[in-house]
Every structure is written in C-alpha cells, then in structure tokens.
Amino acid sequence: MICVRQGGPPRYRFETFPETGLVHGAFTRLGGSSSRPYASLNVGYTVDDDPARVAANLQAVYAAMGVDEGAIVSGRQVHGNRVAVAGPDDGGRVFDETDALVTDSPGLLLLLRLADCAPVYLYDPERRVVGLAHAGWRGAVTRIASRTAQTMMTTYGCRPEEIIVGVGPAIGPCCFEVGPEVVEAFEGEFGDVPGLITRRQASGKGYVDLGLAVARQLADVGVTRVEQAGICTMCRRDEFFSHRGEGGVTGRFAAVIGLERT
C-alpha cells in the first residue's frame, strides 16, 4: 500500500488497484477532530466519543472521497458473515447485522469501521463491481472474505480470475495472540496451513495470521490476486486504532471503496 497525504486526511491505497474509475482507501487515525483516547479521525459511533466530532470526522472522509453522506452504504457490524448487496437506491443505508457489502452502482461508497480486524477490499474491473468485508477472527473462520467474492460471482457474474483483492491494515501475526479455542477454530476450518498459526505454546495459545487466513479462503474459491498491506495496527498505533493495543478503549478507522461515476 502507498500513503496518500493530499486532498484530505491521510489514507492508504493499494498499488494493484487502478487510480481511475475507482475510489478506495484505508484511512488512518490522523487528521480528525476527536480527542484522546479517540484521537483523532475516529469514525465509530459505538465508542464513547463526542458524536459531533465523529460526524465531523466522517464528513472529512466523505470529502476526501468526493461524495456526500447520501452516497454512503455501511453495515452494523457484528463479527458475522452476512454479505449485503447494495443497489442504486441504497445510498445512506445501514444494513443490520452485516459485515460485508457489494455493489455495482457507481457513486455509492461502501464504508466499514475497524480497529485491528482486517478490511478486505474486492474489485472486478471487468464487471465493474466492488466489495468490502470486515474480517476479525470470527469472520475469518466463517469465511467472510470468500463469501463476499462468491456473492460478487453469483449476483453479478464476476469471474474469480478477474477479482483483485487488497487486505488492509490489521493486527499482524507478530501481535495477534489467541487462546486455544481460537487456534482450534482456525485449524478446524483451514487445516494445517504453514504460517497460519505460529509460536505455539504448551497452553495451546498461538499467533494467528489473519491476512493468510483471508488469502487461503479466497484461493479456495479461485481468487488468487491478493495484495497484503503488511501493516500491523497494534505495532502502528501511531497511525491506526488498535482495540487490543489500547486496552479496548480506542476509536475506529474508516475503510472505503466505491465506483466512480462515468
């Protein structure tokens, strides 16, 4: 990923995604109006931040992407694997209990909120379809990323070999220590994937590579063009919110993607 610092708050974009016809970004925690511990570009209303500041931060995100509030489509995230299909009349909608979104409607901007979980961006340049998924450990184990790709295939006729994917900033395998029940869940779903679980301990704990879990499930449905950000949100708390790294009291950064109007 490369950092874009002009035209609004800093955000990262994928090098493999085109610069025309598509807008996308993983915004950092910088360039907003919230104060500690939500400093400063917090876009989450579910934390104890001033709602007026959250609204101002969201407006800064919208302006950077060249849209207004009526173009935003988001989900009420629950760490599940439901994928919602957004149509041209869904601007301004928040889908209940939804952790992934897809659309082929130009002018809409898909938005999810994160603080350690992996944002997964999907784009089919042939069919002109985008998707966005929120993959924490529960979402990864229940294959939220591959379900999103499959929804693009079944709804819009996308072909797996045409879908480009970016896995954004998330807690990395350097920091994502999990208990034995989570280790068992990953191994039960994905089997013995080299590098998926590292630094195994006698207690059964280990360290999970979320990005690898996402790439593996996408490969299982034929999607292999995956760019990994390789940015750990817990290591880079100077740039990103980290739920684990900040003891659960922190903000949420914005992940967005949309098709430009032609």
Image: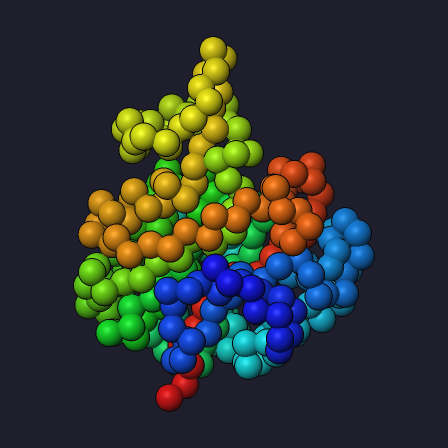
Q: Nearer the viewer, residue 1 or 122?
A: 1
Residue at left 69%, top 50%? 238
Residue 113 in the image: state x and y as whole percent.
56, 56
State the residue lying farthest toward the top.
202
Residue 30 shows in this picture: yes
Residue at left 69%, top 40%? 246
Q: Is residue 50 left or right of residue 97?
A: right
Q: How is the image coloured?
A: rainbow
**How many numbered circles are shown?**
0
Q: Is residue 51 left or right of residue 173?
A: right
Residue 217 location, quadrant: top left
Q: Image height check: is 241 above or below 54? A: above
Q: Image height check: is 88 above or below 17? A: below
Residue at left 48%, top 59%? 1
State the residue lying farthest toward the bottom.
262
Q: Is residue 126 left or right of residue 176?
A: left
Quadrant containing the C terminus is bottom left
Residue 131 shows in this picture: no
State the residue lying farthest toward the right.
35
Residue 167 in the image: state x and y as whole percent.
42, 53
Residue 32 location, quadrant: bottom right
Q: Is residue 34 left or right of residue 181?
A: right
Residue at left 40%, top 80%? 20
Residue 36 in the image: state x and y as whole percent.
79, 52
Residue 189 in the image: state x and y as whole percent.
30, 32
